[in-house]
Image (tube, helix red, strand yellow):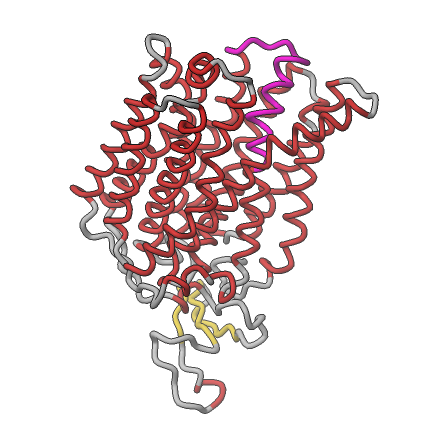
Amino acid sequence: MGGTGVSPVPAASRTGETPVPPNQDANSVTINTSEGPTRAPTSAAPAEFPASAAAIEPPEQPSSTRTLLTLALALFLTMLPVTMLVPVLKELVLDRFGQARAWAHVFMSINMVGAALLAPLGGALADRLGRRRPVLMIAALADAALLWTMPHANSPALLMALRFLEGGAHIVALTTIMAMAADGCGPHRRGRVMGLIGSALILGTAVGAPLGGRLGQSEPSLVFQVGGGISLLVAVLAAAALHGCRARQHSRSTWEALALLRTRPQLATVFALAFVDRLCVGVIVSSFVLYLGECCALTPGQRGGLLALFLFPFALLCYPVGRLADRVGRVWLMLAGNIGFGLMFAVYGFLPAAWLPAAMIGSGVLSAMLFSPNLAICGDLAPAAQRASAFAGFNTAGSLGFFCGPIVGGLTCWAAVQAGYDVSAGYRAAFVAAGVCVVVCAVTVAPWLTRLPARHLVR
């Protein structure tokens, strides 16, 4: 299926000791290449790194194409309600309650707080049970119920409480789908599988906003009703079409799943990159959109068009990039994408408006390069018994990054203006700060990632 074959061989081949059974970690691996089998010793690898992804999970039991496509559809549907609310934010919060503008910002961020706090618990529960489908169904049903309840909230405080819980329910559903997809593929197919999942995620994000805008033209609260119906459809889809999705191992306790970073500290590098990448997305949907309106004098339609030029190449290329990661390795592809994206992001404020469409397309391509391999590495490095917890950590880091993005962008711009610079210089400083964060993070984690001994990760 592309990539190299990795199979454990007895440690006795080097040490004279009793051979290690195939389902246990070995001290060396056999790499099947075009030149024939060669032995790659892993004793020099850092102790905290597994010899390979194949050495930490049971034999592959691949999911059918139908199951993977069903998971991708479920994830696409799960993402729609998230951005459906954005175009009618003013009507849902400000016009409805007559509150200050700050409440709209709280509404768009409080769900990220709920996601960050509840995702680890949901992931640990899914790992402890070893049964993903019931967790997905419960999370999707809870999401539907919370969305349907929001139009009946009689105060901003109650609306924010419901939004907090809805963010948690949504992220648990998202995490569970990712874990189910990673469970159903071996390391040499995981790039393309997680690329498919990444494409579904970004495509759902891109389609949700125009769908919400169309619904909101007649009645803003329709986004809650339709969003709840979509979440209910996800639960029905899981019940009807995902019978065979079950973790091949499950954690012995909830605490074991929650303590994943203690046993797999290398996952911290994956989470750090997820944080800074989503931080930039948070800057895009806040500071960059404001910059386009205030400094470039673009209309709402033109601003939306630029965001589409970013999102659609991102969505369409995640799967091809995932396939490429299976063939050439994940790490260098991901690092190149992060560094390129960070540099591109840093120069947004210095580009003429006529160059911004090309910059958005380039950013979408580079985002696919960094996102799909990072998802695949998360699945590779996670023990099979804690894979949902690993993706919960990935999504928690991403949620925190998205939450911090508008704060970083806003504070940087404010500080520049307070220092006597004009507002355009403030926005440029915000883009440079976010872009530099991505580059510095990628350069910092590179030594750890490039020391990974698994050949399908580093080539």
Along the line of sight, the residue nearer the viewer: 381 or 355: 381
User: Dividing the picture into quarters, in which one does residue 201 lie?
Assistant: top left
Q: Residue at x 48, y 68 (%)?
A: 50
Along the line of sight, the residue nearer the viewer: 115 or 348: 115
Measuring from the top left, give residue 356's x and y in whole percent.
Answer: 62, 20
Along the line of sight, the residue nearer the viewer: 9 or 199: 199
Measuring from the top left, give residue 13's x and y in whole percent.
Answer: 45, 85
The part of the chain drawn in magenta is: 279-301
Residue 199 shows up from this direction:
no
Split into 4 quadrants, where in the image is the C terminus?
A: bottom right
Measuring from the top left, give residue 155's x and y in whole percent.
Answer: 41, 23
Q: Is residue 339 above or below residue 308?
A: below
Q: Is residue 221 left or right of residue 313?
A: left
Measuring from the top left, give residue 288's x and y in whole percent.
Answer: 61, 23
Q: Is residue 61 left or right of residue 239?
A: right
Q: Is residue 274 above or below residue 454?
A: above
| Chief SS of the magenta region | helix
- As drawn, the residue found furthest toward the right would be 420
413 magenta-colored:
no
User: Dividing the picture into quarters, in which one does residue 353 lie?
Assistant: top right
How many numbered marks are there?
0
User: Dividing the picture into quarters, in which one does residue 355 lie?
Assistant: top right
Q: Residue at x 55, y 32 (%)?
A: 281
Q: Is residue 412 above or below residue 299?
A: below
Q: Residue at x 55, y 26 (%)?
A: 285
